[in-house]
Amino acid sequence: MRIIGTGVALPQLRVTNDMIAKYVDTSDEWVASRTGIKERRIISTESLIDLGAQAAKDAVAAAGIDMADVDLLICSNVANSYVTPSLGCIIQGKIDATCPCFDINNACAGFLTALDMADGYITSGRYKNILIICAEEPSRIVDWTSREACILFGDAASAAVVTDGEGLKKIKLSTKSLPDVLYYRRKLEYNPFVTKDQGEYKPLQMNGREVFKMAVSASVADIKKVVEDTGWKMEDVDMFVLHQANLRIIDSIRQHLDLPEEKVPHNVERSGNTSSACIPILLNELIAEGKIKKGYKIVFSAFGAGFSSAAATYEWK
Ligand code: COA
């Protein structure tokens, strides 16, 4: 399976740390020093559906295929205003695709989860061209009256087209059920037959320190495992494309694996954590800047709510 095109659509509005400090008790100094994040894009006037559609169209154009050639659409999304139908189904109508569509939710590991599924479909011969869309609007699930989580996230849509051929080497998904460390709970409709507690709404809740430790240990373990399973040595790898949660997490993973700074690119300072959209956004940037060369050995690693993590080895063709 190989990646043949990527696309990105970002909201217009740039929100700096100083802008957030007008609403919650924080500062640019605190956020930048603890997370590396200086600004993020937040959806103000756009719709997530339109951003997803734009990223999808750009990825298909970059892949050099027609929308009619897309055999399957997998959309990765944590939350949007529709519970049903799926966001992928809604975006399908905006991009004139006719293939089957569905959503997956594996939080920040969503892109690599979709890549793993796509690899299974392609390897089995079931589908040839698969469009993966990652459309995320975390700004609408965080609590903007509390400083803990709203500083971390940004909104974005990104997409990738994958097809048969050489590229993906190994991919590994892991989950350890720890729903309390990072979660968002919606309130369901009142049901007169329910005699237990009807359940309450909770905006995104996070044990930041615990998530930090789990992110670093999961990513380090996943990367070591996929690199070894591929038969590579860590020093053979040209680039590590990691989930962009926080610069301190990225630095800590880099130090644990003793990697040089230039092999671990990041853009979290400009985008914040855009959940599953992070990896295709960074990949799209690296491709546009000519930083990924033919034959490059790449490692992807992502982690997030679940606690779920994923890593993959990939040789760029
Ligand atoms: N601005 C200013 N102060 C803040 C703050 C903010 N936005 N958020 C927390 N603080 C305060 C706390 O209230 C606490 O104050 P106290 O010492 O008076 O009690 C102090 O800063 C330290 O808080 P703590 O939570 O221990 O900070 P930290 O060094 O662990 O950094 C995170 C907090 C969230 C930046 C860090 O834990 C982290 O990055 N975790 C991972 C989060 C993540 O990436 N989640 C998504 C994963 S996909």
Image (cartoon, grey):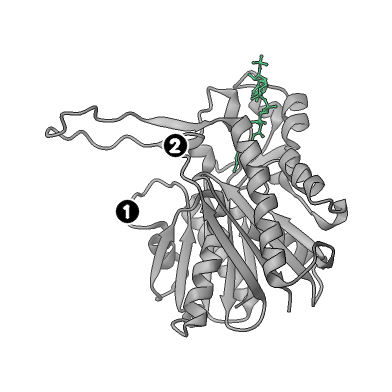
Dot 1: few (<14), some (14–19), or many (≥20) neighbours within 10 Å? Answer: few
Quick one: 3 or 61, which is closer to the camera? 3
- Residue drawn at (40%, 76%), measured in percent from left and top? 98
Which picture quadrant has residue 245? top right
Position of residue 94 in the picture relative to residue 207 (left or right): left
* Residue type, numbered disc 2: Tyr
Q: Which residue is painted at 71% across and 66% down in the image?
A: 228
Corner quadrant of residue 101: bottom left
Quadrant of the image containing the C terminus: bottom right
Residue under pointer 2: 184
- Which quarter of the picture shows residue 59? bottom right
- CB-based contact (under 8 Å), mark 2 and mark 1: no
The three-letter amino acid code for the residue at tag 1 is Thr
Dot 1 beta carbon under 8 Å from ligand 1: no
Q: Is residue 101 left or right of residue 316?
A: left
Decide if residue 10 is in sight here. no
| Quadrant assignment for ligand 1 | top right
Say which mark, if any, is on residue 92.
none
| 33 w.r.t. 276: above or below | above
Number of the label disc, if any, that sits on residue 84 = 1
First in sequence: mark 2 or mark 1? 1
Give x and y (percent) for residue 161: 58, 72
Relative to 182, is 231 above or below?
Answer: below
Q: At numbered mark 1, what does the secondary structure look like: helix, strand or loop?
A: loop
Would residue 224 be visible to someone looking at this image? yes
Q: Position of residue 79 (x, y in %)?
A: 44, 46
Q: CA distance from mark 2 to mark 1?
A: 18 Å
Q: Is residue 112 above or below residue 125?
A: above
Question: Residue 114 location, x and y as percent?
Answer: 51, 64
Question: What residue is rendered at 87% in x and 53% in y?
Answer: 260
Q: Secondary structure at mark 2?
A: strand
